[in-house]
Amino acid sequence: MSKNNQIKVRVIGGGLAGSEAAYYLAKKGYAVTLYDIKPKSFTPAHCNPDYGELVCSNSLKSNDVYGNACGLLKEELRILGSMVIECADKTKVPAGNALAVDRELFAGKITEKLRSQPNLTFCCEDVCEIDFNVPTIIATGPLTTDGLSKFIAENFGGGLYFYDAAAPIVSAESVDMENAFITDRYGEEGVGDYVNCPIDKEGYEEFYNALISAKTADKHEFEKTQVFEGCMPVEIMAKRGVDTLRFGPLKPVGLTDPKTGRWPYACMQLRKENNDATMYNLVGFQTNLLWGEQKRVFSIFPALKNAEFLRYGVMHRNTYLNAPEVLEANFSVKGKPYTYFAGQITGVEGYVESIASGLTAAISLDRRLQGKKEIDFTDKTVMGALALHCTLKTENFQPMNANYGILSPIERMRDKAEKKRILSERSIQKIQQITEYINE
């Protein structure tokens, strides 16, 4: 293992984490083979033959570096040279302070970057077992195929799961703009990135009653499942109380309707799905309703009365490891130092979090193969804190999004915004130091 190009590395899974890991290791000179079932076959949630396909949303959440932990995580990744975040920045669509992308262009750009690497080869194969003697990163995601799922269960003590859901997409031209207005929250009319669909109290009550009584797919099985809070189906959220949605995805605060000069009683937001603004995503409306029910219920909003649904919301099972029992803080398998996991299967939840785990695993594997000192990202960075969460033993291990609460605490401060700023500055400084150390 004296020269990188003599070391063969396998990356299994061409999603966000796998793409990030494969690219990083190929750039380092390793002979990387990226395995994926595409384009010969697809999981129930995928349809694009390109790598790095987004499923549930086109948003990578906030870009606010000093006030949002996911925005901070993206900045950490930029400093470290993340290929996937670079592709996201190059294919972004207007979405206020969020980083949303054109899905097709995003996946196409990632695939182009991967195929540009001479050390990277591609294998369309359903991998069903792992050779623990070959350096491998398993990044098969929450929809790991049956064969590999069985192997993982047999070798790593079984898996856990929860269910998440994707929101519908409607045709832009089918939205009735006479009953909608364009603005960002607290923004000025006509300059925002969101289409806002207001509804009055009477209409909201009609919608609410229709929603909580609508038919869902696989209802009996679904009622037994665990649902991750970050992807809570709107119909489940609604059953927590009549006003729950008005404090959640239908929150009208800061959205002044130009027709009335007031905030609506409730308001659905639509976000651009692509750069051409021909498609819109129903923000926060992940759902497990039957497709006919989705059209009937969501069309109660006046702006969507004639909406053309280009993609209905779907729900699927997400599988993840009991990571504290299986993984080290660098995402390597305990007792198997050349086998790593990355992505949502590790128990990190979210697109950006998956990218971070892929890069963390790749950096660690590279240094292990070169006999170099392990990188400790520490819990002063979001990357490090997420990895540490996956090793923290608990009675009920659950997936985790990026958030300030997992960072190493500082002294108590009344000013929450100032506290976040200090935590962010500390994290960026640490990541800059780590990047310089890696590049020495």
Image: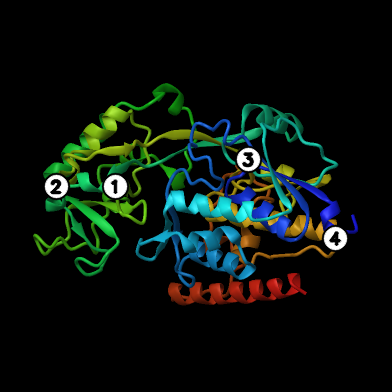
Q: Which residue is mark 4?
A: 370
Q: Nearer the viewer, mark 2 or mark 4?
A: 4
In primary-sequence order, the first of circles 1 and 2 is 2
In primary-sequence order, the first of circles 3 and 1 is 3
Q: Which mark is residue 305?
A: none
Q: Which residue is mark 1?
A: 245
Quarter where residue 215 is shown: top left
> In which quadrant of the rendered image does the N terminus lie?
bottom right
**Whole-Å distance between the Cαs marked 2 and 4?**
64 Å
Q: Secondary structure at mark 3?
A: loop
Is 282 located above or below residue 369 in the figure? above
| Amino acid type assigned to the residue bearing label 1 in the image | Leu
**Whole-Å distance between the Cαs marked 2 and 3?**
45 Å
Q: Which residue is mark 2?
A: 201
**Whole-Å distance between the Cαs marked 1 and 4?**
52 Å
Looking at the image, do the residues carrying marks 1 and 2 touch, with CB atoms under 8 Å apart?
no
In primary-sequence order, the first of circles 2 and 3 is 3
Looking at the image, do the residues carrying marks 2 and 3 touch, with CB atoms under 8 Å apart?
no
Q: Is residue 132 visible?
A: yes
Q: Residue at x 50, y 37 (%)?
A: 46
Q: Which residue is mark 3?
A: 140
